[in-house]
Image (cartoon, helix red, strand yellow):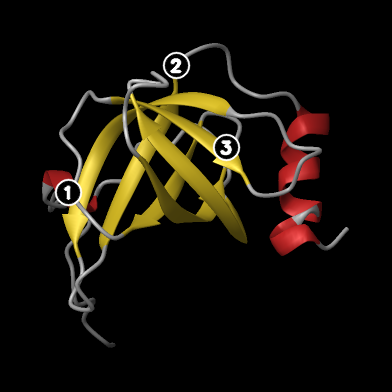
Amino acid sequence: MRESSARSDEKLPAREVDRRQWVRYPVRLAATCRAGGSVDEPVWSAQVQDISHGGLRLMCPHSMDLETTVLISPSYPRLLPRLARVVCVRDRPDGNWMVGCAFTREPIDERELLRWVQYQNGKA
């Protein structure tokens, strides 16, 4: 009998426990971002890497503070900008930052989520 590499009564470290409520869909969608959603703040480019009903993951050229509100505007004009709150920030070996965001208002509905997935890089 083979021995399991992890015992069933062992708990995973907190960072390895998946607390997500929704399925994430992989996308590659160019976007611009603005901290605070204010027109006075600078704009930067990012790439949306996945999306769910409750949030999305960005790849950015710089870090952001946790709890920062960000206006994310997809490059495809048929997708509406969304406000999100930064909930996770990790640096990457390539010099970019992975930024996890939760939508600040209600989760997006199925139709809007499908549009984000369909319009990757302007391709429907």
**Which residue is depicted at the point 23% across and 78% down?**
94
Is there a contact, CB below 8 Å, between mark 3 and mark 1? Answer: no
Task: Name the kind of residue labelled 1 in the image.
Answer: Arg
Q: Residues within 10 Å of mark 2 (few under 14, many from 20)?
A: some
Residue 68 at x, y = what percent?
25, 25
**Which residue is depicted at the point 30% across and 56% down?**
98
**Which residue is depicted at the point 33% across and 21% down?**
36
Depth check: give the residue in front, 65 or 9.
65
Under circle 2, the secondary element is: loop
**Which residue is depicted at the point 43% across and 53% down?**
45
Q: Is residue 62 above or below residue 40?
A: below
Task: Name the kind of residue labelled 3 in the image.
Answer: Ser
The Cα atoms of the two marked residues, 3 and 1, are separated by 29 Å
The Cα atoms of the two marked residues, 1 and 2, are separated by 23 Å
Residue at the outermost front position: 40
Residue 119 at x, y = what percent?
78, 53
Task: Name the kind of residue labelled 2 in the image.
Answer: Thr
Pointer 3: what residue? 73
Pointer 2: what residue? 104
Tally of numbered tags: 3
Question: Which badge, 3 or 1, is on the more N-terminal residue?
Answer: 1
Under circle 3, the secondary element is: strand
Is there a contact, CB below 8 Å, between mark 1 and mark 2? Answer: no
Depth check: give the residue in front, 41 or 116.
41
Q: Residues within 10 Å of mark 3 (few under 14, many from 20)?
A: some
Pick the quarter of the image with the C terminus.
Answer: bottom right
Question: Which badge, 3 or 2, is on the more N-terminal residue?
Answer: 3
